[in-house]
Amino acid sequence: MRARRGTWALGLLLGCSAEALEGPVKIELHSRTVELDRGLDAPLTEALKEGEHDHVLAILLFRRDVAPEDHRTLREAGIDLLEFLGQDAYSAAVPAGGATPWGVLDALVRAGTAVIPDDKVSPALAEVAREAAGAAAEKDGPSRVVVAFRSAITPEESAKNLASLGLRGEPVGDGRSYEVDVDEASIDRLAIDPDVQWIEQVEGEVRLHGELANAWVNAARVQRLDLDKGPPPAKFEGLSGAGAHVAICDDGIEEENVEFQQIG
């Protein structure tokens, strides 16, 4: 606690916040390393102001742990948190155009950047697309992929989005993911769609929503970076979690949940 109080006091002396002294935060994605410091970057700000789509997918770094009241504020503002990416960062869908809640973003979000299409395509699928693009020989035909739409998008809306691109899919997993036959151009168009959260080849079980962070984030690289940093920061010294009270709240079976529709 001494280190945190010292940082707070130094922030007052310098006329700036302790948050500003923490420095940039790096989020290791499979596609790239995102560095977030302060404010929404230019690509995200421009996309929100232009309002080409109803929502813009973003990576948001929050000023603090997102508390239940913060979640309510975000929902009321139309901000859809998609996946926790670590270090108080989330992938999120943010209303664009005149619906952008600038006040809420300023109050809760420390920094943010726009999601780019490459962030939403699995490394294996991206490699296949690159090889196909560079191959002189005729392509074997379309690839079968799983397209996961963000959780706020209904199955009907997902099917409509696919149809607008001339595609048809078979619902899989939690009902908001579809197996689709695509070519390279279709993958590019899907990756641009702000309602699409993730695209990968069909391999084994389909990821459910809540598991997509494991796809976005390069966990092996993050763990390696943590090990390379040496001992934990002083503010974590002596913390073990001992004595913490943990509760599980269960409001019962949600009979209409799509997962139960898969049974039998």
Image: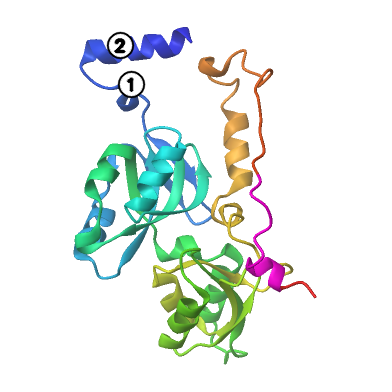
Residue 223 vertical position relative to residue 145 in the rendered view, above or below: above
Q: Nearer the viewer, residue 193 or 42?
A: 193
The residue under label 2 is 10
Q: Quadrant of residue 14?
A: top left
Coloured how? Answer: rainbow
Q: CA distance from mark 1 to mark 2?
A: 8 Å
Query: Is 185 positioned to the left or the right of 36 in the image?
Result: right
Query: Could one spot residue 185 in this view of the protein?
Result: no
Please give the range of residues in magenta. Answer: 250-261
Magenta stretch holds residue 259:
yes
Mark drawn on residue 186: none
- Which amino acid type is marked by label 1? Ala
Residue 210 x/y as whole percent: 59, 54
Other-residue count near label 2 (Cα within 10 Å), few / some / many at <14 / 14–19 / ≥20: some
Check disc 1 and report its element: helix, strand or loop: helix
Q: Is residue 50 above or below residue 189?
A: above
Q: How far across and down, in percent of the image, does residue 166 sit?
A: 45, 90
